[in-house]
Image (spheres, helix red, strand yellow):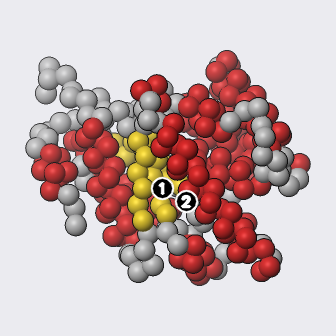
Amino acid sequence: MASHTVRDLTAGLPPSVEPRPLQTAIRFVEFFGLPGIGKTTATTLLASGLRRHGPLVGDVRVASEARKFISRQIYRIGIVAPRFRDREFRSLLSRITRFVIEGGQSSIVDTVRVIWNLSFLIAYVQSERQGRNTIIVMDQGLLQGFLSILLKSRRGATSEKWLDILFAIGVHDIAFVHLHGEIGVARDRLLKRGDRSSRMQRTSPDRDLDLWSTADGACRQIATDLQWGMGTEDHAGVLVAVNVERFASPEDVAERVLDAVLLACLERHRPCDRIGQ
């Protein structure tokens, strides 16, 4: 059930308040967790739930790349290329490249792919921060990008740390949602999808459980490190953990995420200028 505190507070906001300027400092909500745990479904349902609270959160949009491969790359180039004029972005790109290469990947193709994917995500976040007052919900965000790198890393020691890079990008306006549950829950749901979009579906049976255990451990470690790192004023952010039980419906999970994110938005509430309202 929904929290009465959240509902009462959101209901108390004037319904006539325009979604500009944004009523909360939260600009991004991104999910991370095991493949198959329900990130994409929760993203859509959360966005719908947030839109019901327009006076609190403003406009809501789902980050989607529902394009063919070539069109998707052209779109990404259009986001990344202009950022090369920015010194901060070039510095972040250098740090990512160093982090990925020193960590080691399975192949050159994997090295290029993960660098490119994370570079796009950084460029996307930076670009959207300069744009409209909108909350963007992402099922494949920065943490999922770092998780992909860590899962394929063959060496542990690197001169760059993923958490330091993340904090350099900035977490002040991001709510991270960790969907966690038993490995069996995520694995069963992923296998039922019937596609081959995840590397977890393409692994050999003898490595299957090892890979899932590694992924689960990496997710938990990322959440632990992030919670510890965001405990300082310099890196204040929001981390929400929602457990996904085997028989929980997507709607139930999304409702729990909605309550947690709304609370985060309320904590970051910025009253609008009353002039003209």
Front residue (pair 101, 273):
101
> Does residue 163 sit above or below 220 in this rendering?
above
Q: Residue at x 49, y 63 (%)?
A: 180
Front residue (pair 209, 43):
209
> Does residue 21 sit above or below 112 in this rendering?
above
> Does residue 277 sit above or below 7 in this rendering?
above
Q: Local crowd at mark 2 within 10 Å, few (<14), some, or many (≥20)?
A: many
Q: Are marks 2 and 1 in contact (CB under 8 Å)?
A: yes
Which residue is under mark 1? 178
Residue 89 in view (yes/no): yes
Q: Local crowd at mark 1 within 10 Å, few (<14), some, or many (≥20)?
A: many
Q: Quadrant of residue 174?
A: top left
Q: Quadrant of residue 125?
A: top right
Percent coordinates x, y for residue 138 in the rendering: 50, 50
**Residue at the right extreme, as displayed:** 108
Residue type at mark 1 is His
Q: Earlier in the sequence, mark 2 or mark 1?
A: 2
Q: Assign a secondary structure to mark 1.
A: strand
Q: Identify the image quadrant of the C terminus.
A: top left
Residue type at mark 2 is Gly
Residue 67 in view (yes/no): no
Q: Residue at x 60, y 76 (%)?
A: 187
Query: Which circle marks residue 33 in the picture?
Result: 2
Q: CA distance from mark 2 to mark 1?
A: 6 Å
Percent coordinates x, y for residue 151 in the rendering: 72, 56
